[in-house]
Image (cartoon, helix red, strand yellow):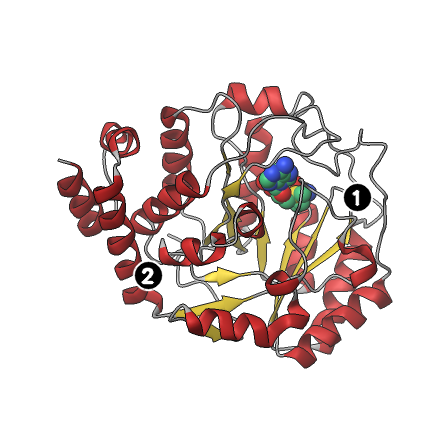
Amino acid sequence: KIKDLIDKLYQEHDLRDEDLLYILDNIDEESIDYLFYMAAKTRDRHHGRKVYLRGLIEFTNYCKRECSYCGINAYNTKAKRYRLTKEEILATCLHGKELGFNTFVLQGGEDMYYDDEKMADIIRSIKDLAPDSAITISIGERSKDSYRLLREAGADRYLLRHETANEETYKKLHSKSYFKDRHQCLKDLKDLGFQVGSGFMVGLPDYTNSDYVKDLRFLKELEPAMVGMGPFIAHEDTPMRGNSSGTIEKTTTLLAIIRLLMPRVLLPATTALASIGESGRKRGLDAGANVIMPNLTPMVHRGDYSLYKNKKSTGSESAEALNLIKEELESYGYECDMARGDSKVIYR
Ligand code: SAM
């Protein structure tokens, strides 16, 4: 039955919730290989063997939010906080441009030091410096008017994971925030013409396969241009210390299902996946991923953007190691692509 369901998912790009649950509950060694095979075939058909590279700039780790899993949440007094100046951000983009990057992902905590005007000014200045490059912003929840200003300034894409589509779990993890607000932000971003990325963490405590089905359904209905999905990894200075991490197996199974549900979506093999095991990145790509986001953040601050334990930011996660990354991808049978790599998802 499971192979028939995978075939149906491959052909129709959707399944009933109970069938998605059946796959998650019953996947075994033989059917998982078939799932990965079909997911990779789907990725190859829509995107080829190219892997897009995005330069990640973690420009602030100040954050006003309470996310109980995150090492840079507002209450972690042990976090060593930093902010990059506009000049430092531009110098980092210039360095990235010289390395060949054509997408810059500006990610940070929810840091209101960077008000709308400052953010818009930074975005405009990056566009002056690298007019043909794409800018992705990932700075959390803001008003639709704020998002509009960022869009008008030239931002192309926005990453905002929904984190979990189980509203009760969402409330447990974010005691002061609401899932419906995050969802509204995603709708606003789409409405404003951003290429929107959403996604969730794998392996949160007490998470069940029915919860993952909710996440998959949420994404299928949202129709994002990108899905960022990686394992939860506990940070020792957060309330969630001591919890076990999401596994490579579960993460790659879900990546493969996402590829089959949304063939055109841009799907990173995330840093978190690479951080939980040597083979994490390769296995993510083999499950249908087609993006990686090497770290461009100035070296002195890399260790301080500590979202979780043992986060990788050097070696093949580092933008400076471009040759290493290219060699690694080629050795797995993929081709490194530094183009903008815009989404092929067309919003209805
Ligand atoms: N502040 C922005 C936001 O809320 O979207 C972007 C920065 S936030 C640190 C980026 C992502 O890191 C979150 O969406 C979350 O999924 C992930 N993250 C945070 N803590 C994590 C952890 N302990 N394990 C895995 N991923 C984590």
Q: Residue furthest front?
A: 278
Q: Is residue 339 above or below residue 41?
A: below
Is 153 left or right of 268, judged from the image as shown? right
Which of labels 2 and 1 is toward the front?
A: 2
For disc 2, the neighbor class at 10 Å (few under 14, some 14 to 19, many from 20) is many
Q: Is residue 291 above or below residue 163?
A: below
Residue bearing mark 1? 111
Query: Where residue 287 appears, x then y in whole percent?
Result: 36, 53
Total number of numbered discs in the rendering? 2
Instruction: Please give the label number shown on residue 43.
Output: 2
Query: Where residue 97 appears, x then y in whole percent?
Result: 67, 77
- Three-letter code, disc 2: Arg
**Residue at screen point 46% across, 69% down:** 329
Cα gap from disc 2 to disc 1, whole angstroms:
36 Å
In what element is the residue under mark 1?
Answer: loop
Q: Is residue 110 above or below residue 320?
A: above
In what element is the residue under mark 2?
Answer: helix
